[in-house]
Structure formats: C-alpha cells, structure tokens
Image (cartoon, helix red, strand yellow):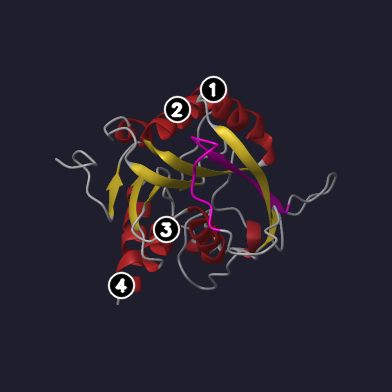
Amino acid sequence: MGVLGRFRRNTLYEGDALALMGELPGGAVDLIVTDPPFAIDFKAQRLNYNRIASNVIEGYREIPAGEYGEFTRAWITEAARVLSPEGSMYIFSGWNRLRDILEGIDAAGLTTMNHLIWKYQFGVYTKNKYVTSHYHILYVVKNKKKYTFNKLDHYPEDVWVINREYWKGRKKTPTKLPQELVQKIIGYSSNPGDLVFDPFLGSGTVAVVAQQEGRHFLGFEIVPEYVAFAREGLRATRT
C-alpha cells in the first residue's frame, strides 16, 4: 500500500487526528506543522480580532480542560512515531496550556531546539491584565544530531513579527495561520519533495503553502466544514 499505508499524499482526510495518526506507518512524514486545540474555552464566533461573527465557519471542536494533558501527550507521542528519523515538528501554543505541550514533548522523547515567539499586530481587549499578542511555537526534532535546517537568513532570530491576515468580508475558520509564517517554517525545515503533515488542519494553510512551495502534504481535520474550506483553498491555489 506504499509508505503511507491507506493514505495518499496531497490529500486531506476528515476524522479524529489521534485515530487517523494511529493508522499511519512510523517514520512516514518529514515535517509536522500544527496548531492544536488549546482548551481555553475559545469562543469561535465572538468579535475577537475584528471578525464578523457571520463570516466565521462554525464547528470548532475544543478539548475539555481536564482532558487536555492526556490528549496532548497522546497526540504528540503519535506525532513523534510518524516523524521520519530526521524529521522535525513545529507546535503552536498559547501560554495557557504551554506546560502540557512541553510535558508532552518530553514524554515523547523529542528534543526542543527552539522556543520561538510569533508576535502579531493585535490581541483580544482586556481590562485588568496585559493583552496577549503572541503565540509560542515549539520547534522540536527527533534526532538532535541530524535534522533539516536550511539557514535562509544569516542571523535567524527566535522572535518573528508577522501580522495576522485580514479576511475582510470573506468566510474563514476561527483560527488561521498567516501564509507568510507557514512559508518561513516550511522553508527552514523541509526540502522540495518532502512530506509536510498537519494533524489539526483547520483552515488548511499548511497544506496550501506546502503545495505552493513544492512539498507534498497530508492533513487531518475532524470538522467537516473546515475540510471543505481547506479543499476549496487548495483548488483555488492550483488554478
């Protein structure tokens, strides 16, 4: 059945990430880039980030806070298994659940190479605390002595200032990574022809950018509406 078992390259699959990853052969993917659920009682359609509620696609699935640690360890363990021996992974996290992500990385036997900060141009308004206007990105590898790192810049720093994308008047998923951010990750940590995988695909940005950058892609997503949105994005960029 090939190196991906029943799965095919350059294809998006609807279903639970943990269940589907369990069917992937070990060592099958070169790079994982993913923005997993955060377990922060995220209100997908509230008027955060200047969005209009009617333009936000419904269906966002959150993980209950009491289950988040176990969920995180389980999916990171599976992610480590399906990574190639020289593979790497970028995990996005808010500060609220960062401890669970870090513990999951350690439990899976992965090595953290960098703790990147993505600074964007705005956050959710707050009254009694600082506005959060950044995400954490954990850059981890399977083998700290041999992994892909293309030094695109002479002095690559660990704080990236990249604006969120405005999708004024257009449908979008509640959380969407900017293409510029994903391009940077894919450029640094993969080569043309590599397989880039996102087990929590969301809007499909990772798959779209991988396709644009001459990489193969594979994506899993549990929300049917998001799968349809991502597939449409891929079709639009092929034309």
Query: In which quadrant is the N terminus drawn?
Result: top left
**Circles 4 and 2 in contact, beta carbons < 8 Å:** no
In the image, which residues are magenta?
133-150
Residue at numbered disc 4: 238
Q: Does 143 appear above or below 129?
A: above
The crowding category of the residue bearing disc 3, from other C-alpha atoms within 10 Å (few below 14, some 14 to 19, many at least 20), is: some
- Which quadrant of the structure image shows residue 112? top right
Q: Is residue 113 visible?
A: yes
**Circles 1 and 3 in contact, beta carbons < 8 Å:** no
Q: Whole-Å distance between the Cαs marked 3 and 4?
A: 20 Å
Task: Name the residue type under label 3.
Answer: Asn
Residue lying furthest left: 1
Labels 1, 3: front one: 3
Lower sequence index among marks 2 and 3: 2
Labels 3, 4: front one: 3
**Circles 1 and 2 in contact, beta carbons < 8 Å:** yes
Residue at numbered disc 2: 77
Task: Name the residue type under label 2.
Answer: Thr
User: Whole-percent x and y of residue 207?
Assistant: 38, 57
Query: In which quadrant is the C terminus drawn?
Result: bottom left
Q: Is residue 40 visible?
A: no
Task: Judge from the rendering whether residue 135 lies leftward or rightward of residue 80; answer left or right.
Answer: right
Q: Whole-Å distance between the Cαs marked 4 and 1?
A: 39 Å
